[in-house]
Image: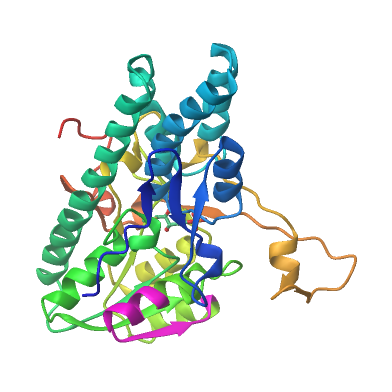
Amino acid sequence: MTEPLHPIEWTGSAIRVIDQTLLPGRLARIRLETVDDLVDAVVRLAVRGAPQLGAVGALGVGLAMAQGQREGWSAGRLDAEVARIRAARPTAVNLAWGVDRVRPLMGRGVDAVVADALEIIAEDERNNHEIGRRGADWIAARVAGRVRVLTHCNTGALATTEWGTALGIVRELHARGALEVVYADETRPLLQGARLTAWELVQDGIPHFVQADGAAASTILRGLVDVAIIGADRIAANGDTANKIGSVGIALACREAGIPLIVAAPESTVDGATPSGDAIRIEMRGDEEVLNWGGVRTAPEGSRAHNPAFDVTPARLVSAIVTERRVVEPALGQVPGSPTGGA
Ligand code: MRU
């Protein structure tokens, strides 16, 4: 394995993150010094991925407090800025979770908030390794021989704080010598699979193919993969799972082919307050992401785009939800309910 990436750092006065819009061409870090910087980075997906949004949201509260002190904000202004961070993207529950976890510490000052946000980062890395081990064990009990995996979007170190969730399971399988190959969906329209997952797989020397999203169902039905492993942005209490657009098609193909679909996510992605997928708000993004390619218009003037960033996979299509604490099997009637608490 390569050196840890440490995609999120606190400098003492700013948040330093990898600008993921520049990968794979350039590995460059940017400083987020204000709430405007942070919200802009979240909205344009310079920082992204549910667990990473949780960590950035929590650090963002400290950032807002520091900015408020510099600029003499009222308590009302500070609350409004924190609310703005919490709402910067709607689907991944982790963003709100990260903000809400540190908010009670605001009365104790910036250092207390930042210390807990840094603890979230440390916990996330530990959680991802545990998810990797549990997921690899679950697969080993069901798949004989070296495993061929299909994955979608980016769920690696870039989407978390280190190692990854679905990609953490892939890394664990690889470390055990149990991985044959990964089919990484390119993940239109923003190419998190082709740009980011493939970059992480190259760094680790993990054999893989990048494939068009439209190839995924065929790859599954032709028997080329043994398991599909995806991440999650929000898991409802009944196990319905919101993840990157395209995930539900993979789930349907897995059901048809009789292979498992695994959802890998930390407990912070389980939203016990949302009863089912119907109640999950799906982020709609701008037309230009779909109507253009590489900055050049590909669809005719006059076309409009339909651009949901996420979809919801019904619980009955999810073979296993793997968290750092448990494996829940919704397709067998088990439900995640509420997150399990405590450290
Ligand atoms: O729009 P993105 O790139 O933030 O979407 C990310 C995903 O859908 C991931 O699969 C999910 O957040 C899990 S990341 C471990």
Instruction: Residue 329 in the image: state x and y as whole percent.
Output: 22, 51
- 176 displayed left or right of 198: left
Rendered location of residue 343, percent (x, y): 15, 35
**Magenta part of the chain:** 199-213
Kindly tell me whether residue 99 is visible in this rendering: yes
Residue found 35% across the figure and 42% down from its top: 269
233 lies left or right of 282: left
| Residue 80 higher or lower than 247, as above or below | above
Left or right: residue 163 versus residue 291 is left
Q: Nearer the viewer, residue 75 or 136?
A: 75
Image quadrant containing the N terminus:
bottom left
Q: Position of residue 159 (x, y in %)?
A: 39, 57
Residue 334 located left or right of residue 229:
left
Q: How is the image coloured?
A: rainbow
Which residue is rendered at x = 58% and y = 31% of the image? 84
* Near-viewer residue (305 or 1): 1
Location of residue 337 with respect to 38 vertically, above or below: above
State which quadrant residue 234 falls in: top left
Residue 168 higher or lower than 1, as above or below: above
Where is residue 119 drawn, in percent x and y?
24, 38
Q: Which is nearer the eye, 197 or 209?
A: 197
Image quadrant of ligand 1 equals: bottom left
269 in the magenta segment: no
Please give the name of the residue rendered at 50% of the width and 71% of the height, measured from the top-left corner: 23
Q: Is residue 156 above or below residue 45?
A: below
